[in-house]
Amino acid sequence: MNIGIIGLGLMGGSLGLALKKINTKYHVIGYDHNQKHRQEALELNLVDEIYDTLDKMKKCAIIVLTIPVDAIITTIYKLQDISKDCTIIDFGSSKSKISSSIPTEMRELVVTAHPMTGTEKFGPNAAIDNLYKDKVMVVCDIEKSGELQRNRAITLFKDIDAKVIFMEANEHDRHASFISHMPHAVSFAIANSVIKQEDAENIVALAGGGFKSMSRIAKSSPNMWEDIFRQNRDNLLESIDSFNREMMLCRKMIESEDWRALHKWMLEANSLHDIL
């Protein structure tokens, strides 16, 4: 089965690697608007073949969109004339706007999904073959997809060893704002607050594991995350407000030297890892 991957960075490249491990079930075809990425994907053996135009990708039985969320919407519109036997799967990190933006006449051809995995790295060289293994794949508004498309997508997700769960797009976006999007905003803020207060020499000399862990995802692509923040704006604002309330509570306890309350607050935070 020909499967086309549009976007050959971390997500698309890793998908290609995972699919190429499954004997000869899938013939993996890649496309990226960046010519350098297309060449690197071939050299790294992320795909079996490269197409140089989007129109050629329309011949694939499955097309997976692993590109920024705004580009997903634009690309779906460009694919309106594909066969009714085709399956389009998007891997966008926000789901409600994408789901509601799909033209009615092709809605059943599209499966909207979000793999809850990734790293701060991007580009073809960031691809790893086990990125999706044992990770959650959230499938949203599945009832809007056709039976053929649902079955193909679920089979594909199982083939790459992802754990499939189902959720409404609006529900997904609220959860994602707290668990993924707001933490990225916090990491960007931590990085900027340090850069604006400390010179490079002190950062290099004093930055320990804790700082590196918390600022790691601030290396993520601004292009990608600007789009995500824009699409999930309202939920993100709510999650940032929640975070700010906790920071102000922490500040108040330190300011008033209420160390017992601060200790209890920290213990409550420790319990998160009882869940994880």
Image (spheres, helix red, strand yellow):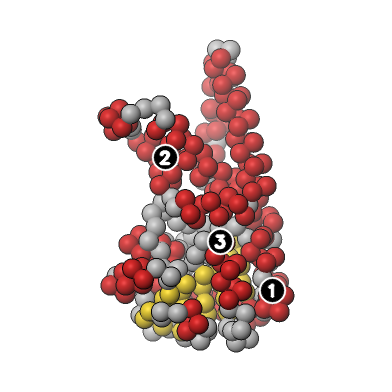
Q: Position of residue 55 (x, y in %)?
A: 50, 82
For the residue marked with disc 1, what is the amino acid? Pro
Q: Along the polypeptide, which appears first: circle 3 or circle 2?
A: 3
Mark 3 vs mark 1, CA separation in Å: 16 Å
The residue positioned 43% from the left and 50% from the top of the image is 220
Q: Residues within 10 Å of mark 2 (few under 14, many from 20)?
A: many
Measured along the vertical axis of the image, is residue 232 above or below residue 189? below
The residue positioned 62% from the left and 80% from the top of the image is 80
Answer whether labels 3 and 1 touch (C-beta < 8 Å). no
Q: Which residue is mark 2?
A: 215
The residue positioned 39% from the left and 33% from the top of the image is 195
Q: Which residue is mark 1?
A: 103
Q: Residues within 10 Å of mark 3 (few under 14, many from 20)?
A: many
For the residue marked with disc 3, what is the amino acid? Val
- Name the disc covering residue 82, or none: none
Mark 1 vs mark 2, CA separation in Å: 39 Å
Q: Position of residue 72 (x, y in %)?
A: 56, 67
Question: Horizontally, is 199 left or right of 241 in the view?
Answer: left
- Name the disc covering residue 69, or none: 3
Under circle 3, the secondary element is helix
For the residue marked with disc 2, what is the amino acid? Ser
The residue positioned 64% from the left and 36% from the top of the image is 241
Which mark's residue is nearer the viewer, 3 or 2? Answer: 3
Which mark's residue is nearer the viewer, 1 or 2? Answer: 1
Q: Position of residue 147 (x, y in %)?
A: 66, 80
Q: Residue furthest top?
A: 257
Residue nearest the viewer, comparing 273 with 125: 125
Measured along the vertical axis of the image, is residue 268 above or below residue 3? above
